[in-house]
Image (cartoon, rainbow, N blue to C red):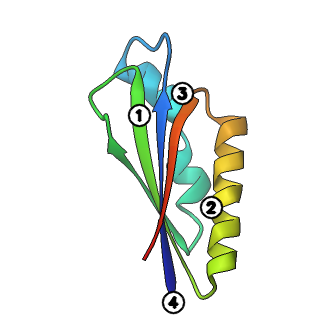
Amino acid sequence: MHIAILTLTFALPGCSSLKEKRQRMGGLHARFGNTPSVAVCESGARDRHDASEWTFVIVGLYKRDIESQCSQIEKKIERTVDARVMNVERDFI
């Protein structure tokens, strides 16, 4: 069993309220949390309007499959989220 922790830090330029932040970052739970091998949560910068941090925990039998899933998550987020990805961290347990 392998576990990856994928943490993405976002900048939300021009975001002026927490409501707007939720709209721009919205749907991450719905898009990725329904996958049985993925858990997702907002893990940092919760009270800031102009930034956000999200952590994904991915579990699987093979490290290469988990790495592939991490890459898919990153690519989908870059295409669908109205924010700039500032940092990506991958840790394997």
The residue under label 4 is which amino acid type? Met
Give the residue pinned by disc 2.
Answer: 70
**3 vs 2, front mark:** 2
CA gap, disc 1 to disc 2?
18 Å
Q: Helix, strand, or loop for circle 1? A: strand
* In the rendered image, the vertical position of residue 77 relative to residue 47, given as above or below: below
According to the image, label 3 marks what residue? Answer: 24
Residue 80 drawn at (x, y percent)? 69, 36
Considering the numbered disc 4 on the image, is that residue within a helix, a strand or a loop?
A: loop
Residue of label 1: 52
State the image coordinates of residue 6 (x, y, percent, origin top left).
49, 58
* Residue 77, picture quadrant: top right
Instruction: Looking at the image, tell me whether mark 4 or mark 1 is earlier in sequence order.
Output: 4
Query: Residue 16, relative to residue 60: is it above or below?
Result: above
* Residue 86 or residue 38, whichever sits in front: 86
Give how far apart the Cα atoms at labels 4 and 1 are. Answer: 30 Å
Question: Which quadrant holds the C terminus?
Answer: bottom left
Which callout, 1 or 2, points at the residue further toward the start of the chain?
Answer: 1
The reply, left or right, for residue 26 in relation to residue 41 is: right
What residue appears at the point 55 percent right and 43 percent down from the top-left corner?
Answer: 27
Looking at the rendered structure, the kind of residue marked 2 is Cys
Q: Residue furthest left?
A: 47
Whichever of labels 3 and 2 marks the residue nearer the N terminus, that label is 3
Say left or right for 11 vs 75.
left
Image coordinates for residue 79, horizontal then vertical, percent: 73, 37
Which of 84/46 is in front?
84
Q: Are marks 3 and 4 in contact (CB under 8 Å)?
A: no
Nearer the N terminus, badge 1 or badge 3? 3
Q: What's the distance in space between the residues labelled 3 and 2, CA to CA?
A: 21 Å
